Structures are given as structure tokens and as C-alpha cells.
Image: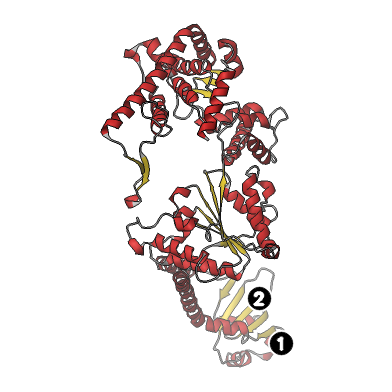
């Protein structure tokens, strides 16, 4: 209704302005002169009139001569021109040399001019009534369609079409989904052997691993209708609307069967029931109940497969995950080195990348990156190349983009005093030296005192290969490296000059030590047990927190073990820094001069990295096997 009154006001003001302009406008022809009948008679008698045109009650007089003005004379409407001349005593001989033209002014133009003053207001009123009725009709349609599903049917063009060839990695997930597409294309082949089409496929994985991309690939591969909708689109503030939309969505899919329904972020409506504020009348629970019934209830649901995606499978209701609903759960892992290389090849197709850039090396430098991270990485590299005026993307562009994705953009404009630059250099050198001389730490790739994001400087260390398991020895070495900057600042500047720089390192180290003790059982004093249970309170949207399942005495032991692990890591870091003080000073000198030290130059300064012995590798392998 607000838009209705707004549009009406705009139209009314527009008509008012137009009417005002027309009322002040003058359309009179400046060359036309209005004269009386006596003047006309005098000019006829003087033989100065060349032509007379009779238009209803108007006489248009054209005088002789090139620049003579055109005159108009008004007469009575029902009086003819000849009768008028007789009444004024004009001799017929005077009219013989004058061209008299009588125009028929009773055609469409005449009637239009006569009726226009009456028709125009009437037509304007009809137009306003029609426009207002259209607005009200639109409001009524919206109200009547409130419970209808807003799912869109996928109709991609050839350029937008995605297939499984466009999805790199995720081999097992693609095989599962290819089988679903095959079910829909050739159902008889499976029915002959007694196999039933699956009701639902749940795609589970971390954000950015390609769940929605796989759904788009299913839409491209399957020659069947594909309906896609977000889980949040079901939920409204009015109870029952979500359930109505679910019914409407499944009715559309059943009419178009065989068909696929894709629900993105299903955890928006599929969370565990029974903990909401609204009880049985909670809108989200009503919507979930309707989804459960539509997938596997009394009515048959043949020919419709539901594909859903979520990165929170732990919060889904158990009824959704039982057989008959989501029969298959496809887990999409973070890509390994081979998958990362394949993903980089896909995203590098339309980019002019120089031949010197090795995608394999980039895959090695990006452990823990998801598919979305890798796509963003090459996009940032392309933007950086354009900013630098290049026609191709070179390796330095991609390497800098890796750091930008990980840490944020460079803060070259940040002004630091000489003392702050020196403290940052010693802090980062401490991390790098400790990590370099501990066998289980990842190789140091780069050390820089140029700030990125929230960090004043950074030490970039990455593994040479993918790591699936973390061992206790690696945790201990990583802890020592994390505390390397803190220890170095205390050794170089003393306790009184200790800065706030290591605050994030201390937070990270404390979290790591806490996990070792409470989650991974890496404490001899506390034994093989997990302390604290993850609990989610949906009431009032409380976050996940740790439920205390141990006594106060055990809490003291946990604190003591965490402190012991951190103290041991600090002492190890201190020992390495004191032993390699000369190499650290040299590294700091280069950092203050160049601000950034790459891996090759770093090794030239401090020497080769310490390698693990064969006995350590064998011992770690045995520990991993026991954990599995």
C-alpha cells in the first residue's frame, strides 16, 4: 500500500505540472493577424485580397504580395460566406478575382477537438483506476503466493553449464553423484536387478570444498529438471509458511519427475528438534517435519532425489540422516596436493599464466587451501599482475597472492620506529631460527618484517607434503617455534622491555597445549581420556561451549600439565636461540636491510635444516598406526 500511494502521488504531481505548463504556454502563430469584418470588406473592395479560406466560423485571408500577413476573421457559425458578403454590400464582381476555398472542418479532427475537453479527464480517471487496481492485484497475488515455493528450475546455457569435468578432485564424491544421475537417466537398468533409487544425498564438507559446484555439475549432467533453493528460504516468521513451501516444492518436482531438488545450507532448517523456544509450534521444526514426511512418508515419492549440502552435519536432526531419507552421505575432504594441482589447472584455463609458473610448486605451497581459496588465489594474482602493468601472470605474483590470502594485504604505509622494526625483526627471527633447528617443524619459506593484516611481521612455514596426522613430537616442536618470538624478545631486551607482540603467539600456544592435554590424551599424568564435552545450547542462540565433566582436583592437574608443556617448549626454544645467537643476529641484520628474506637466502644465512633420523620416522609411523 505504501508503494501504491507513492505512485499515485507521483502521477498526480506529474499531471499537475503538465497542466500548469500548458496553461501558461502560448501556441498562437505570430504571423496570423486577427481583424474585423469591416477590414475584410474594405480590403476586398480595394482588390488587395488574393485568397480566402473558409474554415467553419473562421475566414483565413491571404493578401497579395510575398510578405503580406495572414489574417483571420471570425464570423457567425451558421452564416455562409456569400450571405455574409451580400449583407455587407460587397459586389459580386469584386469576388470573381479572389480564390475562395471552403474547407470541410467536420471530420475526425473537428470531433476530436470538440470532444477532447470532455474525454481527456475521463480517460485520465480510467487510467488511474486501472493502475491502482493493478497495484492492489499485485499485493493480493503476493499474499496468495506467500506459501508457494521460490525454488528456481535450473536452465543453464551452454556457456554457464557445469559438468563433472569442471570439478577437479573429489573423485569419490563425483562417482557417487554420477551414479545418482545414472539412476535418473536409466532407472530400468537398476530396477531390473532390484535396486531402488536413493531418496537423498547429503554433501558434507568444510566451506569452500565445492559442494554447490558439485550440485551445479549434477544439474549440468542430468537431463532432468533441477530445482534449487536455499534452506533459509523456507523459514518465515509465520508458522506453517515453510511447511507450505516444502509441499509446493515437492509437488512441482513430482509433476516434473524424474527430477532433482537441491537444498543448499540445509542446516538452516534441519537442526535438531526439541530445543527451540516455540515448542511444537516452532516454524523451523514445522518445516523440518514437512521435509521428513515428503522424503519418506505415506505418500510415494518416486522419481525425486533430494541433494542437500551442509558444513554442519553435527547439528542435523537424526531423522534426516536415517536410511530412507538421506540414504547417502558424501564427504568432501579438503583437496590433497594432486587435487590442488588439478583445481589450479581448471582455474588457470582462462588466465595468461607464464610458462615459468609451476602449478605443482603452487600446489605444494598451498596445504590446507580449499577449492574456493585456490580460485581466489589465482584471481588475486591476476589482479596483482594488472596492477603492476603486466600482460601475463608470473610466479612472484602468485607467491605474493598466497601470502595475501593467508595473512592479508601488505601494510607498507604503516610507520614504525627504528626500535619497533628491530623488535619485529628479532621476534620473527626467533620464530624462524627455532623452527629451522627443530626437526619436526615445517620448512621456513619466508621471513618478513613488512606487516600483513593484523600482524606486524610474519614467518611463513609450510610442509613439503600433506600431513593427515599430528604427532606428539610435532606438537612439541611447533609449540617451541610458536614461543620462539616471545623467548627471543625476553633474551634480547629483558623482562622489562617485553612487548605486546607475542600476545597472539601465547594464545595459539595455550590452545595447542590445551588440546594436547584435554583432547588428544598426550599427557602421562592424566592418561588416555578426553576432558570436557562439546555441548550446543540452541536456547537463546547460545554458542558451543565445553561441558565440564571432571573434578576440581583434575582441573588443577590439567592446568599443571598445560603449564608444564608450555614451560618445556619455552626452555627448548630458549636453548636453540642461545645456541644460534650469531646466526640470528645476522638474519636480523639482513631483515632490517631488505625487510624480506626468501627461503633460499634464509638457508644461506643459517645453514641447512635439521633432518629427522630414520629411527624417529619409524617411531612416528608406529604412533600413527596406533592412533588409526
**Nearer the observer, 162 or 24:** 162
User: How far apart are labels 1 and 2 at the CA level?
Assistant: 15 Å
Left of 124 or right of it: where is 363?
right
Which quadrant would residue 339 be assigned to in this image?
top right
Q: How is the image coloured?
A: secondary structure
Whether residue 38 is visible here, answered yes or no, is no
Judging by the rendered image, the residue that carries numbered circle 1 is: 96
Measuring from the top left, give residue 600's x and y in whole percent: 61, 16
Measured as percent of width and height from the top left, residue 27 is found at 54, 70
Residue 290: x %, y % from top left: 46, 65
- Upstream in sequence: badge 1 or badge 2: 2
Q: Which mark is residue 270?
A: none
In the rendered view, tell whether residue 384 sits above or below residue 28: above
Residue 152 found in image quarter? bottom right
Which residue is at the front of the view, 104 or 240?
240
At horizontal 58% and vertical 69% (from top left) the residue drawn is 254
Disc 2: which residue: 63
Crowding near the residue tagged with mark 2, few <14, some 14–19, many ≥20 C-alpha atoms within 10 Å = many
Q: Residues within 10 Å of mark 1 (few under 14, many from 20)?
A: few
Camera-side residue of 183 and 365: 183
Residue 303 location in percent, x, y? Answer: 61, 66
SS for tag 2? strand
Horizontal side, residue 323 vs residue 108: left or right: left
Q: Is residue 207 visible?
A: yes
Relative to residue 108, is residue 296 depicted above or below? above
Provide the secondary structure element on which disc 1 rests: helix
Which residue shows up at 45% across the image and 20% down it? 480
Task: Determine whether label 1 and label 2 are within 8 Å by CB.
Answer: no
Residue at the image point whose x is 57% and y is 23% from the top: 618
User: Foreground: 225 or 559?
Assistant: 559
Q: How many numbered callouts?
A: 2
Amino acid at each position: 500500500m505504501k508503494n501504491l500511494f507513492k505512485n499515485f502521488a507521483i502521477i498526480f504531481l506529474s499531471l499537475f505540472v503538465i497542466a500548469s505548463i500548458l496553461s501558461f504556454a502560448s501556441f498562437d502563430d505570430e504571423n496570423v493577424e486577427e481583424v474585423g469584418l469591416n477590414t475584410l470588406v474594405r480590403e476586398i473592395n480595394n482588390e488587395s485580397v488574393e485568397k480566402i479560406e473558409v474554415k467553419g466560423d473562421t475566414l483565413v485571408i491571404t493578401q497579395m504580395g510575398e510578405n503580406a500577413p495572414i489574417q483571420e476573421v471570425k464570423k457567425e457559425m451558421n452564416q455562409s460566406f456569400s450571405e455574409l458578403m451580400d449583407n455587407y454590400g460587397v459586389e459580386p464582381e469584386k469576388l470573381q478575382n479572389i480564390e475562395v476555398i471552403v474547407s470541410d472542418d467536420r471530420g475526425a479532427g473537428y470531433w476530436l477537438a470538440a470532444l477532447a475537453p470532455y474525454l481527456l479527464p475521463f480517460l485520465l480517471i480510467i487510467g488511474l483506476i486501472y493502475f491502482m487496481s493493478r497495484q492492489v492485484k499485485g499485493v493480493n497475488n503476493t499474499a496468495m503466493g506467500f506459501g508457494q515455493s521460490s525454488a528456481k528450475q535450473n536452465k543453464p546455457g551452454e556457456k554457464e553449464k557445469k559438468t563433472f569435468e569442471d570439478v577437479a578432485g573429489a573423485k569419490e564424491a563425483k562417482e557417487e553423484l554420477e551414479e545418482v544421475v545414472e539412476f535418473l537417466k536409466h532407472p530400468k537398468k537398476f530396477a531390473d536387478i532390484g535396486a531402488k533409487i536413493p531418496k537423498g544425498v547429503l554433501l558434507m564438507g568444510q566451506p569452500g570444498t565445492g559442494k554447490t559446484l558439485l550440485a551445479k555439475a549434477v544439474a549440468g549432467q542430468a537431463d532432468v529438471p533441477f530445482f534449487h533453493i536455499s534452506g533459509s528460504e523456507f523459514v518465515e516468521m509465520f508458522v506453517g509458511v515453510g511447511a507450505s513451501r516444502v509441499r509446493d516444492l515437492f509437488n512441482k518436482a513430482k509433476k516434473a519427475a524424474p527430477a532433482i531438488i537441491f537444498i543448499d545450507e540445509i542446516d538452516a532448517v534441519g537442526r535438531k528438534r526439541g530445543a527451540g523456544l516455540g515448542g511444537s509450534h516452532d516454524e523451523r521444526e514445522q518445516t523440518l517435519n514437512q521435509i521428513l514426511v515428503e522424503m519418506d512418508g505415506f505418500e510415494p515419492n518416486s522419481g525425486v532425489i533430494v541433494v542437500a549440502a551442509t558444513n554442519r552435519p553435527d547439528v542435523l536432526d537424526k531423522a534426516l540422516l536415517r536410511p530412507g531419507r538421506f540414504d547417502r552421505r558424501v564427504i568432501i575432504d579438503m583437496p590433497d596436493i594432486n587435487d590442488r594441482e588439478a583445481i589450479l589447472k581448471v582455474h588457470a584455463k582462462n588466465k595468461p599464466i607464464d610458462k615459468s609458473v609451476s602449478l605443482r610448486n603452487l600446489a605444494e605451497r598451498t596445504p590446507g587451501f580449499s577449492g574456493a581459496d585456490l580460485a581466489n588465489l589465482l584471481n588475486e594474482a591476476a589482479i596483482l599482475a594488472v596492477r603492476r602493468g603486466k600482460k601475463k601472470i608470473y610466479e612472484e605474483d602468485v607467491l605474493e597472492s598466497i601470502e595475501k590470502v593467508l595473512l592479508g594485504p601488505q601494510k607498507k604505509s604503516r610507520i614504525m620506529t627504528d626500535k619497533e622494526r628491530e623488535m619485529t625483526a628479532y621476534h620473527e627471527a626467533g620464530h624462524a631460527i627455532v623452527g629451522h633447528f627443530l626437526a619436526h617443524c615445517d620448512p621456513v619459506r619466508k621471513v618478513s618484517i613488512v606487516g600483513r593484516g593484523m600482524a606486524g611481521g610474519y614467518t611463513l612455514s609450510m610442509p613439503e607434503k600433506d600431513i593427515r596426522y599430528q604427532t606428539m613430537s610435532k606438537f612439541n616442536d611447533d609449540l617451541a617455534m610458536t614461543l620462539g618470538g616471545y623467548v627471543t624478545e625476553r633474551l634480547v631486551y629483558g623482562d622489562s622491555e617485553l612487548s605486546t607482540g607475542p600476545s597472539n603467539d601465547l594464545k595459539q600456544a595455550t590452545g595447542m597445549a590445551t588440546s594436547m592435554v584435554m583432547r588428544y590424551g598426550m599427557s602421562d599424568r592424566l592418561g588416555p581420556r578426553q576432558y570436557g564435552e562439546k555441548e550446543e545450547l540452541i536456547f537463546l542462540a547460545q554458542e558451543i561451549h565445553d561441558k565440564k565433566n571432571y573434578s576440581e582436583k583434575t582441573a588443577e592437574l590439567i592446568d599443571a600439565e598445560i603449564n608444564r608443556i608450555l614451560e618445556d617448549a619455552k626452555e627448548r626454544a630458549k636453548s636453540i636461540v642461545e645456541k644460534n645467537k650469531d646466526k640470528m643476529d645476522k638474519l636480523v641484520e639482513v631483515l632490517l636491510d631488505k625487510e624480506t628474506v626468501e627461503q633460499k637466502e634464509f638457508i644461506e644465512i643459517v645453514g641447512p635444516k635439521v633432518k629427522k633420523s630414520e629411527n624417529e620416522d619409524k617411531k612416528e609411523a608406529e604412533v600413527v598406526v596406533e592412533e588409526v
